[in-house]
Every structure is written in structure tokens, then in C-alpha cells.
Image (cartoon, rainbow, N blue to C red):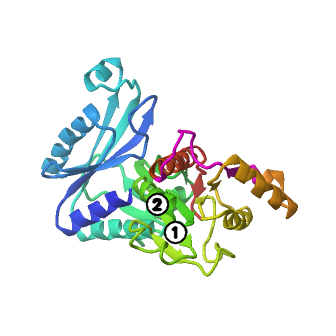
Amino acid sequence: MKKLIQQICTSLADGQDLVLVTISSQSGSTPRLAGAKMIILRDGRISGTIGGGLVEAKAMEAAATCFATGRSLCRAFDLDNGDAANTDMICGGRLELFLEYINADESNQRTFGDLLLAVQSGRKVLLVSQLADGDASSLRFVVDHRGAASRDDIPEPLLAAVKQVRSSTQASTLIELQGQSYLLSSFAVAGTVYLLGAGHVAACTAEAATRVGFQVVVMDDRSEFANRDRFPQADTIKVLPSFADCFQSFEIDGDAYLVIVTRGHMHDMEVLDQALRTKAGYIGMIGSRKKRNAIYSKLRDRGVSEAQLEQVRCPIGTAIEADTPEEIAVSIVGELIYQRATGRRAWHLA
């Protein structure tokens, strides 16, 4: 999603108007969930996807109307069996699209610039768009994780209503207030993967995790491994004096995914002991069951409880008979994706 926002900012800065297409609601079986987005430029180029097939084709047709009239549109689609046969999608659900015509004026450049800064900094943020089936001057603003609006002319009742909404990582929510509809698009952080260890598996895992939207932090006590040449995609690389107190500089919360892949059993145990004292949403450790049992036994001697150990995924990753570092990375990231999708916690603005 960050790349999509960057594209919006770049297009607006270049003076290009665009149409931002959002699945504002959906029910039943659909190719993408509510909150999925794509942008369409005047020349027909697109970024992002709302599921492909007939739905995107119809969205592009509707976008042409938006460009011609300078107005936003709402469109509903029933993906029944007849439509599914024409699209090669066996769906059968229903979805509604909101096509926002966004002109490249200073106000929109500021709004999406604010959105990009918030997402880049790792903060949770909402984009609020008035669902007026009308001109492009409809109200649009950003609300940050503290509940502060990016504009000072937002009516207090509207801001109060926005703050009451609980939203998951990429969902969209519709609210009604005083006869007006508003689409709240959540751009909550998609999770940060902390790689404890910078070996071959970590390098492959960093690349795969970045591609599916995770932020990546790499930590190791060896500068020849933890460096930008080996981890060009990583958001943060930290060379540690040792693995002792390795989480001291970070805020480890429910959006944190700790992946323990150090070079040895003792380092793994040292890191796991610290990890179990954090509020991480996921803790995984590489290794065989024999290794796991030996480490767990020593941690029990230190007073670690069975309930704490049950939080750990070890051996880490989905069971796909992975062997090479690349395959192991796919296994690990597959498990992280599943955890992110099923263990996602709702958040609300302050």
C-alpha cells in the first residue's frame, strides 16, 4: 500500500489528475476484500489491483467518465454465476466501488503527502473521503493515530464520529453523518518483521517479507553480515555489540513479528528469553525439534512458563518440506502472512 500512496503523490506532483478506486464494501466471495485499492491515470495506466478481470475493466470504463466530468462515482457489482463465467472468477459475491476523482491541486497534494509521511513513519492513519457522487471538491483529510486531523476546518461532530471507528489493518469503513457518507480507509502498519540474525535465511526472508508489505528490521552482531549490501530492502539494519538487550531500542508490540535465525543455539536461546518478555504478536525460532526441546528445557530452568513457550512457533514456518534458504524464507513468510491475516487486532484512534 505504501508504494500505491507514493505513486499517488508522484502523479499529483507531476500535475496528473487520477482516479483512486476503493472497494468500499463487499459481501460473499469476491476477488479482493473491502479496502483494496488501485489508481487509474488519464492515459489508462494503473497501479494496484482490486481483483482483475471484469471488475477492473468496468472500473476503468467508469474512470473515463470521472476524467471527462471531473466527478467521483459509486458503482456496485454482483458477481453471480453468470458474471463469473465471463470473468473466469467463481465468485458470487457483491462489492461496491468508490471511484474518487482526485485533481492535482495543492490541497490533494498536501493530503496525500501527509498520508505518505504517516505511513512511512510507521504510524496508523485514516484517510477520510466524502462519498459525494459529485465534484472533486468533496472533503478529504487524514486523521493520525492520535486522532488529530490534517486540516483545521473539520467539523467537530465529523471528527468525533471518525474517532469512534475501530478499523483493522487495511479495511474500509462507511459512516453516515448528517445526510453525508464518508469512506474511512485504514492505512495501519502491515507489521514489522525483526530478523534476529543476518545469515542466508535472513537475507532471503527479508526480501520476501518486504515484497508482501512488511517493514523489516535486521539485527546481528556481525557488521560483515548486517549491512546494506546484503539487505538492500531492509528498513533498518542494526549492528549489535551482542544479542544481550537486543530489543532495547525498539518498541515491540502486537504488530511485531520476531524471527529468530541467529547462527547458534546459545544466541537463539538468549534472544528467545528476551523475546518472551515482550508484547510481540508473533515469535518464531528456526531449528529442529531436538534443538527446540533442549532450549526450552534450559529456559524452564530459568523460570520460563509453559504458557510462555506455547507462544513460540518452532520449528518456524509452514510445513512445506523447505530445504534451501529461499524455500525456508517462503515457509517463514507464508506463516507470517497467515498470522497477519488471522491474528490481526483491531485498533482505534486515541
User: Label 1: which residue?
Assistant: 218
Asked which secondary structure carries label 2, the reply is: helix
Depth check: give the residue in front, 287 or 101. Answer: 287
- How packed mark 2 is, by other alpha carbons closer than 10 Å (few <14, some 14-19, many 20 or more), is many
Task: Compare marks 2 and 1 and give the one earlier in the sequence.
Answer: 2
Q: Which mark is residue 206?
A: 2
Seen in the image, is 252 located left or right of residue 28?
right
Query: Magenta part of the protein: which range?
Result: 309-325
Depth check: give the residue in front, 308 or 301. Answer: 301
Question: What residue type is disc 2 on?
Answer: Ala
Quadrant of the rendered image containing residue 210? bottom left
Residue 231 appearing in the image: yes
Residue pictured at 31% horizontal, 57% vertical: 138
Q: Which mark is residue 190?
A: none
Asked which secondary structure carries label 1, the reply is: strand
Tell whether position 146 is magenta. no
Question: What residue type is disc 1 on?
Answer: Val
Q: Position of residue 175 (x, y in %)?
A: 47, 48
Mark 2 near mark 1, Cβ–Cβ under 8 Å? Answer: yes
